[in-house]
Amino acid sequence: MTKMSINVDGKTHGIDADADMPLLYALRDDLGLRNPKFGCGLAQCGACTVLVDGEPVRSCITPVESVQGRKVVTLAGLGGGKAHKIQEAFIAEQVPQCGYCINGWVMSAAALLEKTPKPSDDQIKEALTGLKCRCATHISIMRAVKRAAQA
Amino acid sequence: MNHQINRRHFLAGAGALTVSVLMPGEKAKAWVPTEGTALRPKLDPKNLSSYISVNSDGTVVAYFGKMDMGQGTDVGVAQMVAEELDLSPEKVHVPMGDTATTVNQGGASGSTGVSHGGAALRNAAAEARLILSEMAAKSLGASPGDLVFNDGVISVKGQPDKKVTFGQIIGGRWFTAEVEWNGKFGNRLAVKGRAKLKDPKDYKVYGTSPPRRDVVGKVLGTQDFVTDIKLPGMLHGRSIFPPVAGAVPVKVDAASIANIPGAKVVHVKDFLGVVAPREWDAVKAARQLKVEWSKVKDPFVEQKDIYNHIRKAKVIKTGGAKKNAKDASVVEAAFKKAAKVIEATYEWPYQSHASMGPGCAVVDYQPNGITTLWTGSQKPHYGAEGVANILGLKQDLVRGIWVPGPGSYGRNDAGDASMIAAVMSKATGKPVRYQAMRHEASGWDPKSAASIHTVRAGLDKDNNVIAWHFHSKSFDRLNVASNESNPADNLAGQMLGVKPKPRKTYATPSESYKFPVKHQTWEVIAPMLEAVNPLRSSHLRDPLGPEIHFANESFIDEVAYATGMDPIEFRIKHAEHPRDKAILKAAAEKFGWKPHTKAQQKRNGDIANGYGVAYAQRNGTRVAIIAEVDVNLKTGKVWGKRFVVAHDCGVVINPQLLTQTIEGNIAQALSRATYEEVKFSKSNVTSVDWETYPILDIKDVPAKVECVLINRQEIGPTGAGEGSMRPVAGAIANAIYDATGIRIRQAPFTPERIKERMA
């Protein structure tokens, strides 16, 4: 066990855990956050996605020690206490069905819009490729990202 | 709109265990395991109060014994109840899937959310309206016929000041009336009272699109899922399934996880798992535990031989629909008279539910037997019964609470998770949150089984179809039942030695094609492994629909072309039902279909472009789909570029949510048709993650999905959860033929398979 300090959604937390434990378990177990989800543990689906220094990262394979001194943002912290514009767009377009995959899509789209405020369809697909949605809401996802880009 | 983060709503509903008196509208927090101590009349299907109540503020509560997996079934139910009461749908609360507050309406099943589940609550609402009008008439000194209902206010016609609200009449108290119950639980539960339903010409709420109620919480990260339930003292559980299917643990070295804090082995008969206070420790312990497994013979044939295995395997049960042929001899006599017989065989692989997250459940078993299950399963009532059954408890001691889970699409691994968590909680004496790992979610969920379908048509000398025979051969559609209440149907139950009870049944195509002699039959074969089988079959969304109608609708196309007819024209000529003809016409018109009698094979460089149609019925709903595809002749990649869907499910309750449900069906069916195939070796399933079981990617998203919603107000809603999944694979296969002249008779339509056929 190693004593570490991580900054999540603007707050610093001390934790005592295996240094190589994936960040996901620190967020869920040690910090009691619930929104990052376990989907595969293999970085293949995106359900566990958080932003680390603004970049979408799969927390299920990211060792917790590697995010020390960096800024971790989760879905619940994305808009800093209110909904981020990508979240407003996902709500307006009624995107999620089961919703378990939502972290991957919202966090990756937020990171895309930060760098590319007016993405083309191909740029959206390029940024989101590899993410999984088993309910197959892809059509609504495309509508929502385009809506957020126009917001 | 600016949405503020607010966690209050989930705290109210996350299942705190305090016991208190239940008031109308209150959710999970109030529960007592014995009857009579709460003010609410007994939760009996004969009591009106089991379905509907009025809060003091005049809002109405409709207690829904199903659940919603994210398509807005609850919103549809709210609209059905609101319509009968002339109330705004926002004023109808719809708690769902809690065995303490709702009667068993079967969970999500067979697209019956509104057609059956909603219908019962609508009838209850009509009865409540009748009672409210009688009570209002008394208090206002008017006759019930002179009353006007307007958004929770009842007034005397022409005297708007003579009024009373729902809340004033009965708010905070319970209806004491009884309704006529048909004696059934589950999907087929039906109730009616004295009241007549509203005349369709007076509909105001149907046809509007109030939004979903779960979206804000899911998008802002404030909605708890079943995976997020935490209880004091809770342990995390992980299971350990055999490396060779059929093997059982013979030696378990508990010392091999001694270095992990609090980690313990749970080994009951052939069930093996681990628990630990911290989740990561449970994951590590499951990986680290040293187990010696029994030596068993490889259970499966090689995957490349699966269709031959099905072809040759002994038949254990036959069935089907004879339609207008009395028996097989009539059919064969008709084929003998034919001038020409056409025949084709179609093959469909094993497919997985592959839900976004592995199955999860939390079970809190107490020494006095009082037990709570939190489940993401689409059948929480049956799940609670199952927990009672595997723990040997009386049913009324176990409460099941549905919490949103990671997808479902039929009988996925959520039901297995409930019983595993129950076994672990009883063995440890602690609440246990069990979640499988990805390799178990994809490798060990119940599958839809591989199948072969042979279709024959006999033509006379003038190319008229005089004989038709559709025949399927496959594994049992329900080696484990979709109802999760029997340990025989669950992994944990089977590991504890309960023998499976296969249902030995299958299905036939649903359409209205009329031919002089038409026969639809099936044969079922035995599973390759009797119990604890990772290839055991059960329901996957639109059970057997995609494969059967892929075959049926591909063959309809083959016969149309063989008889020199356009595929739309052929279908309209032979589909007998006027509503079926109407959707085919509507789809063709919207698409801009150009009649043709052979593959058009349009080319643009390496891209071949074509379109195809397919149609099917599903429990009264009818759907015609035209797919347009691009086939890359170099890579073999098929892109489902455009879909036009003509959809008739009777009355349209919520057009927006119906449209999004259809879009999801199209995209998921596109995934199943072009990507999905469970892989296995002779010893086990080998598609165990998203690399080995790929699904649709955002790059494959269709450019356009257009829905034509045919609204038939005079016909009750017949359900939309699955109908538009059914014809997609057939429409794509027919479009591939139009584009390339190649008939693809084996799914999925992967680049490799297309290239192989083009070579």
Image: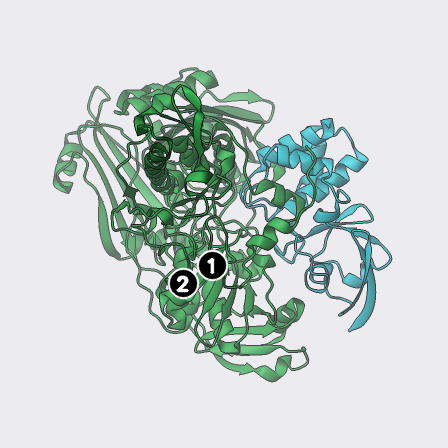
Cβ atoms under marks 2 and 1 closer than 8 Å: yes
Give the left or right position of residue B54, taking residue B512 as reference: right
Residue shown at the point (19%, 27%) measured from the top left: B339
First in sequence: mark 2 or mark 1?
1
Percent across and percent down for residue B18 are 53, 64
Where residue B145 sits, quadrant-wise, is top left
Percent across and percent down for residue B271 are 47, 73
Give the left or right position of residue B442, taking residue B482 as reference: right
Question: Badge 1 is on which residue?
Answer: B21
> What is chain A's hue in the picture?
cyan
> Is B280 above or below relative to B590?
below
Question: Badge 2 is on which residue?
Answer: B37
Percent across and percent down for residue B530 are 35, 65
The green-tinted chain is B
Q: Secondary structure at mark 1?
A: loop
Nearer the observer, B720 or B694: B720
